[in-house]
Image (cartoon, rainbow, N blue to C red):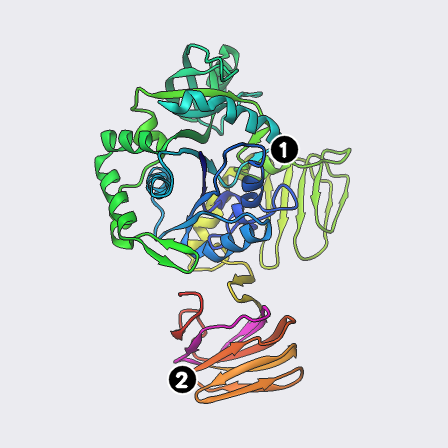
Amino acid sequence: MIVPVILSGGAGTRLWPLSREQYPKQLLPLAGEQTMLQETARRLAGLDDLAEPLVVCNEEHRFMVAEQLRQIGQPASAILLEPVGRNTAPAVAVAALQALSREEDPYLLVLPADHVIRDAQALCATIAGALPYAAEALLTFGIVPDAPETGYGYICAGEKLQSLPSSGLHAFSVAEFVEKPDRAKAKGYLASGRYYWNSGMFLFRASTFLAELQRFAPEMAAASRLAWENRQEDLDFTRLDADHFAACPSDSIDYAVMEKTDRAVIVPLDAGWNDVGSWAALWEVGESDAQGNVCKGDVIAVDTRNTYLYAGSRLVASVGLDDVVVVETADAVLVAAKDRVQDVKQVVEALRNAGREEHLLHRRVNRPWGAYEGLDAGDGFLVKRITVNPGASLSLQRHQQRAEHWVVVRGTARITLEEMVVDRTANQSVYIPIGDKHRLENPGEDLLEIIEVQTGGYLGEDDIERFDDNYGR
């Protein structure tokens, strides 16, 4: 049995302003009609003996992950919630423990949720062929390089392993892992034919990984086990114990295990892989016009070449650009030279240091019950558009520093205000005084839309005291 382990915990800061901390790149449709998480789950359809995937994600993303899997009809065997980020090795450790609790020593197929793979058929064929080598080894997939790329780590292949008749693939021992090289070294790696890009994709038995983790990182193995053993089930999610997981050392699979074990094996993979780690990478995988431009949304490009243009909420027009990236969202615009897009993370850091929120959230924020979008704000007031899905409800809550005025635009709103429950329809409103318990519900079959006007001395999202919540917040 193969259990896919989809790692969906990254932040994707180099793809700001589209990717935000609470809405990262794996949850966005960056390279196709579906999100990268959905594409990752769907591309495995060609494999036999495949279990439902295990997903490891940040607890802030849990409802978006669950909803996106529901949209493609792909249930997860479990969605494991990380209370804090601890890199890939602990994430795979808890996934291995979860898988072993349900299957007898399954194979784990570890896949980051934010990669592009153009040839899913080639991927599945390579995974199937690699399976016999993974019976006793820790196998990683090395991407066959087609350029001297300096943005990837590399893996050097060692001795060729004895071919297995049931495989049809060549596998090699791992001679070494190397960090991102300069261009001269990258050219040498490409010319040698022995080096492959490090994909961050793995295949091994759950017991083998846990044994090697115990051997080389016993503190991490112990903390991961305690975090999993003290887990709590919450709706469709598995919450890892926060204290034990926070105490776990943070490290990648490569550093914690793969660079130290003598059981590492590499199988070459040629399937149109790209880790989409920057806007330049998205330009590379996108469909370009005759001038080499990749355009998304409402774009007019005049005398523009080799440029990535993304319009998220309005018209974007360019004149005389070459090798540039322009990305527009409702609350931010990025303009960068294509060869400097790796430095976008410095913008994110500047926003964080300034105490701003543009690195955290979009103007439209998804919630398990629907969404809200900021429309206007000023001294002592904030205006939002709130949409509530049919049958959904917000928590029973109150605020100590703000009052709210709700105006129904469409649909039916069922409003709890202290001991009173009333229904309001289009053009009707209700006032929520400071300190009063209240709740908003949509009892109808159509989307509910309201305009909310907040007034008060402090209007932050942390001024919420919840008394009852359908979503365990």
Q: Can residue 381 be seen in this view?
A: no
Labels in figure, total: 2
> Which residue corresponds to mark 1?
284
Mark 2 vs mark 1, CA separation in Å:
53 Å
413 within the magenta span: no
- Mark linked to residue 435: 2
Q: In which quarter of the image is residue 274?
A: top right
Sequence-wise, which precedes: disc 2 or disc 1? 1
**Residue 142 pos. (x, y %):** 48, 23
Quadrant of the image containing the C terminus: bottom left
Vertical side of 147 occupied by 199: above or below? below
Does residue 191 appear to the left or right of 315 in the view shown? left
| Percent of width and height locating residue 307 | 67, 38
- Which residue occupies 48% across, 48% down? 76
| Residue 367 x, y percent position in the rendering | 51, 63
Magenta highlight range: 376-402
* Residue at 54% in and 44% down: 37
Tell me the residue at 55%/53% (across/down).
70
